[in-house]
Image: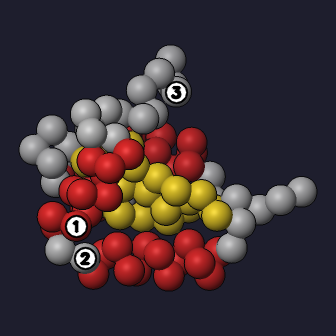
């Protein structure tokens, strides 16, 4: 069984950004959407999954999350827009 870890960015319509790391992306996004993911995502309603990357190394995932959290806002926007120029919710339809 392989381990999978995800670094992800959530956004709201106003483009407030939240960066996190998880082993279960499906479950973690659901938690954020239910308001129990973090106080930040609850307060700013950052529930749209706009970017993620996967690795099998938890240390690498944590390091990447910390790296992205130090970035300027524009760098984070560039990261999202490189792979998701329309800022689509990549988890749209997951919970229907």
Report, in whole angstroms, how far the alpha carbon at label 1 lies from the one at label 3. 28 Å
Check disc 3 and report the residue beneath it.
94
Report, in whole angstroms, how far the alpha carbon at label 2 lies from the one at label 3. 29 Å
Q: Is residue 31 shown to the viewer in this render?
A: no
CB atoms of marks 1 and 2 within 8 Å: yes
Query: Residue at position x 89%, y 57% from top?
Result: 1
The answer to which image quadrant residue 88 occupies is top left
Outermost right residue: 1
Query: In the depicted view, which residue is nearer to us: 3 or 31?
Result: 3
Outermost left residue: 14
- Which mark is in front, 2 or 3? 2
Q: Secondary structure at mark 2?
A: loop
Report, in whole angstroms, how far the alpha carbon at label 1 lies from the one at label 2. 6 Å
Check disc 2 and report the residue beneath it.
71
Query: Residue at position x 38%, y 80% from top?
Result: 67
Query: In the depicted view, which residue is nearer to us: 32 or 93?
Result: 93
Q: Is residue 91 shown to the viewer in this render?
A: yes
Outermost front residue: 82
Q: How many marks?
A: 3
Return the x and y of residue 16 as percentages of the image width and height: 16, 54
Q: How many residues crowd around disc 2 within 10 Å: few (fewer than 14), some, or many (20 or more)?
A: few
Q: How many residues crowd around disc 3 within 10 Å: few (fewer than 14), some, or many (20 or more)?
A: few
Q: How many residues crowd around disc 1 within 10 Å: few (fewer than 14), some, or many (20 or more)?
A: few
Q: Is residue 81 left or right of residue 5?
A: left
Q: Secondary structure at mark 3?
A: loop
Check disc 1 and report the residue beneath it.
75
Return the x and y of residue 71 as percentages of the image width and height: 25, 76
């Amino acid at each position: 069984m392989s381990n999978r870890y995800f670094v992800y960015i959530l956004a709201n319509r106003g483009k407030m950004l939240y960066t996190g790391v998880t082993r279960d992306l499906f479950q973690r996004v659901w938690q954020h959407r239910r308001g129990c993911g973090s106080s930040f995502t609850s307060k700013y309603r950052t529930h749209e999954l706009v970017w993620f990357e996967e690795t099998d190394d938890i240390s690498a995932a944590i390091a990447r999350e910390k790296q992205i959290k130090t970035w300027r806002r524009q760098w984070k926007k560039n990261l999202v827009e490189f792979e998701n120029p329309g800022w689509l919710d990549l988890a749209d339809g997951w919970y229907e």
